[in-house]
Each structure stands twice: as structure tokens, then as C-alpha cells.
């Protein structure tokens, strides 16, 4: 029987990096994150991949995205 090896989804990898960035950057609740474009460049991913990661962190209550204002 063949064993399947699961690969982590890019969204999950980026979400973990973003959580680390928030913790190591000493960001407090309400502090703004850098723009999507800046974070995508920092993590070497596309903006849609970063957006998916941000949405997953928003679902967990870690960040709060506001349309036209970015993420806090």
C-alpha cells in the first residue's frame, strides 16, 4: 500500500509566518500591519496567497481586516 505524504498548503505556511511576524514585531491589538503588497514581498508570495492567509487568521480572531483600511 502506498503512503500519502501531505504537503502543507501555502496559505497555512504564510499564516504561520504572519503570526510569527506579528509576535516578533511586538505588535499590539489595534496596530496596523504593513500593506498586502509589502507583506507579499516580505514572504515571497503572491497577494492572493497572502490574502488567503490573512482570511484564515481573521477567522481565528488573530487579525481584523477592514475594507479600505487594511488589517489590524
Image (spheres, grey):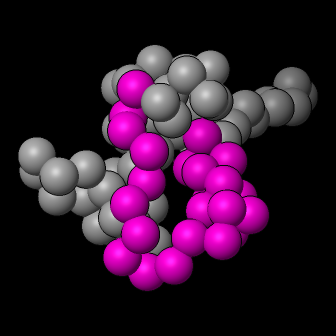
The part of the chain drawn in magenta is 14-37
Q: Name the one closer to the observer, 21 or 16.
A: 21
Q: Judge left or right: residue 3 versus residue 55.
A: right
Q: Judge left or right: residue 62 versus residue 7.
A: left
**Who's the residue at 55% across and 22% down the image?**
41
**Who's the residue at 36% across and 76% down the image?**
30
**Who's the residue at 86% across and 25% down the image?**
2
The location of residue 13, given as percent across then percent down, is 66, 41
Q: Name the one closer to the observer, 43 or 61.
A: 43
The location of residue 36, given as percent across then percent down, is 38, 35
Q: Judge left or right: residue 9 versus residue 36.
A: right
Q: Quadrant of the C terminus?
A: bottom left
**Is residue 62 in view from this perspective?**
yes
The outermost residue toward the left is 68
**Who's the residue at 25% across and 58% down the image?**
65
- Asked where in the image residue 44 lies, by quadrant, the reply is top right
The outermost residue toward the bottom is 29
- Asked where in the image residue 57 lies, by quadrant, the reply is bottom left
Give yes or no for residue 34 being in the magenta stretch: yes
In the figure, 72 relative to 13: above or below? below
In the figure, 58 relative to 1: above or below? below
- Give the number of marks: 0
In the figure, 17 relative to 30: above or below? above
Q: Quadrant of the N terminus?
A: top right
Give yes or no for residue 22 being in the magenta stretch: yes
Q: Name the one closer to the observer, 32 or 63.
A: 32
The location of residue 23, given as percent across then percent down, is 68, 68
Amino acid at each position: 500500500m502506498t503512503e500519502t505524504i501531505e504537503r502543507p498548503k501555502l496559505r497555512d505556511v504564510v499564516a504561520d509566518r504572519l503570526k510569527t511576524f506579528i509576535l516578533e514585531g511586538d505588535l499590539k491589538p489595534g496596530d496596523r500591519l504593513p500593506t498586502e503588497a509589502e507583506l507579499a514581498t516580505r514572504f515571497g508570495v503572491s497577494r492572493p496567497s497572502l490574502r488567503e492567509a490573512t482570511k484564515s487568521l481573521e477567522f481565528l480572531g488573530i487579525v481584523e481586516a477592514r475594507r479600505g483600511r487594511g488589517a489590524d
